[in-house]
Image: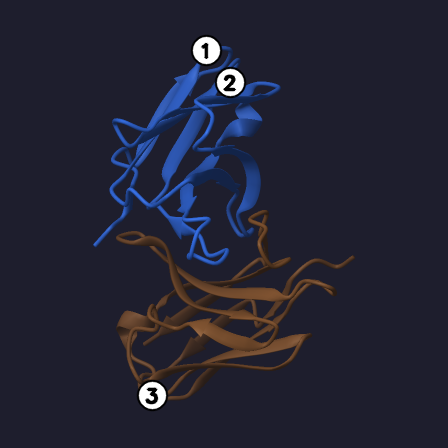
Amino acid sequence: DAGVIQSPRHEVTEMGQEVTLRCKPISGHNSLFWYRQTMMRGLELLIYFNNNVPIDDSGMPEDRFSAKMPNASFSTLKIQPSEPRDSAVYFCASTMTATYGYTFGSGTRLTVV
Amino acid sequence: DQQVKQNSPSLSVQEGRISILNCDYTNSMFDYFLWYKKYPAEGPTFLISISSIKDKNEDGRFTVFLNKSAKHLSLHIVPSQPGDSAVYFCAASALTGGGNKLTFGTGTQLKVEL
């Protein structure tokens, strides 16, 4: 199993541009989570899906952020327009429903200049 | 509102000695706790967990202690090894009504020196 796959690994973009982060969860996992890591807040949950349905998006910071999971093997996190304060490492994780042993991807390091 | 707090951003320990990483939480609904370990340029990986019905769980060199009355847990690593140098995240969940989402702390950078 290739694990949770995130792309791109690094993204540098200019303020105001649209950014799309991608995630492929482990096959058979039906819970998917998007986290953001910053020094100040650690790992912060943005949104999570169960069986492709968004369950809790209370962590999404603003309307500039949106996430989709069109099928069980793919999810996107989009920021439009991006701002310098969005610079962080974004992690995707997946697991089976009702379990906690998340498998994390390697993350996408986003830099907005 | 940081519901899971790791007040020590960094910790330095000599090889062979004990490392103690601490974590406090504020949400009394949390009843399941985990520790994750993260190396640079990698995602966090699950290390050890404990349910609120226990006060201790041990796995090899790693032991997690839970003090529910103090809303405090700690991770003990003994003996510490250089390969343990990483960022350690404490995480918590409410099994009832919380789904399976985890609330993480800010992390503690552990450095094990030779």
Q: Mark 2: give few (<14), some (14-19) or many (20+) Cα within 10 Å.
A: many
The residue at the point 57 percent across, 54 percent down is A98
Front residue of this view, candidates B112 and B25: B25
Chain designation of label 3: A
Chain designation of label 1: B
| Circle 3: residue type | Pro
Disc ID at residue B17: 1
Disc ID at residue A81: 3
Which chain has been coloured blue in this picture? Answer: B
| Circle 1: residue type | Arg
Front residue of this view, candidates A56 and A20: A56
SS state under label 2: loop
In the picture shown, does residue B105 fall above or below B52?
below
Do dots 2 and 3 share one subunit?
no
| Circle 2: residue type | Ser
In the picture shown, does residue A62 fall above or below A47?
below
Q: Mark 1: give few (<14), some (14-19) or many (20+) Cα within 10 Å.
A: some
